[in-house]
Amino acid sequence: MTKTISLAFSVLSLALLQACGGGGSGGDSGSTPTGTDTPGTPTTPITSPNTGSVSAPFSRAATARYQLVGPSGQRFGPVDPGVQDASGAMTTLGSNVLSGSTAVKDISGDASYAMGRWTAGTVTTSSGTSTLSGAGNDVYHYLAVNLPTAFPTSGTFTCDAGVFTAPTYASGAGGAAVVGSATGSASLSFGADGATVAGAINVTASGSSGSASLNGSVSGPSSATITGAYFSNGAGAYVQIGDGGAGSYLVASSFAAVLANGSHYIGVAKFRCS
């Protein structure tokens, strides 16, 4: 079953998967250790707590929207303000801020999108402020895209293999608070009723697996669709269409998968369709 909802609201926060733990957002890149440069002594390389990179900074348009999912729920709204640091990590998404001694994993992006996973730092959201512990289930996943100004009236687009943050444990009987892996596929077509998305995201962790369906219809650029039991402690996804640039489109999703061992895993994914 799918549901279509409007993105006209600025922030939406709903309980997620009986999730536990803290949350975060902010504006600083993390502090990094430095080596001592002594003659005749090898220099310790400077390391960063961040992983991943972007090919170009996110070119934020007036239509930019974010998806942010973590232990305290899901949030969606305009990327206004939006702050991206030198590593390519987004540290401010609207009223959600990551600050302090931060770490952002799975950084990915270009001019059309920005993605990552907040794993350390102080997070400030409309629910309050907390410090991420670094535990497997104490993280936030984010995805920012620019919405198209209009949908084409027809056309079928071929989507790539996708980009994903590493899914993290949220709750459930499995109890394995470890980082998982994700793969997936998507297809996108347009018609008189808007965009039709099909596909799935497959999650594996601790030898167990599960999936989240992407199948649904998006009626217009300012709308999204919800699949399965995404807001009801089950498997499913929140799906919207982004502007990929040069005539391409993005299938942008936050998702939840219920694995065979009973554990719930969350993350975000992006497919480019051209």
Image (cartoon, rainbow, N blue to C red):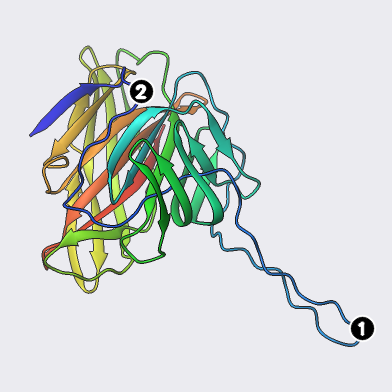
Q: Quadrant of the N terminus?
A: top left
Q: Which of marks 1 and 2 is nearer the N terminus?
A: 2
Q: Is residue 132 above or below residue 223?
A: below
Q: Quadrant of residue 77?
A: top left
Asked if labels 2 and 1 touch by Cβ distance under 8 angstroms, the answer is no
Q: What is the three-letter code of the residue carrying label 2?
A: Ser
Q: Residue at x 38, y 13 (%)?
A: 150
**Which type of secondary structure does the marked residue at label 2 adopt?**
loop
User: Nearest the camera: 89 or 29?
Assistant: 29
Q: Where is residue 51 in the image (x, y as percent from the top left)?
A: 54, 60
Q: Could you say whether the residue bearing mark 1 is in a helix, strand or loop?
A: loop
For image coordinates 88% across by 81% down, the residue present is 38
**Where residue 54 sits: x, y (%)?**
58, 47
For residue 75, which quarter of the picture?
top left
Who's the residue at 53% across and 32% down the image? 82
The residue tagged 1 is: 39
Q: Which amino acid does label 1 sit on?
A: Pro
Report the residue marked by disc 2.
10
- Left or right placement of residue 152 versus residue 63 in this view: left
At x 38%, y 42%, the residue is 270
Q: Quick check: 220 left or right of 83?
A: left
Q: Is residue 244 visible?
A: yes
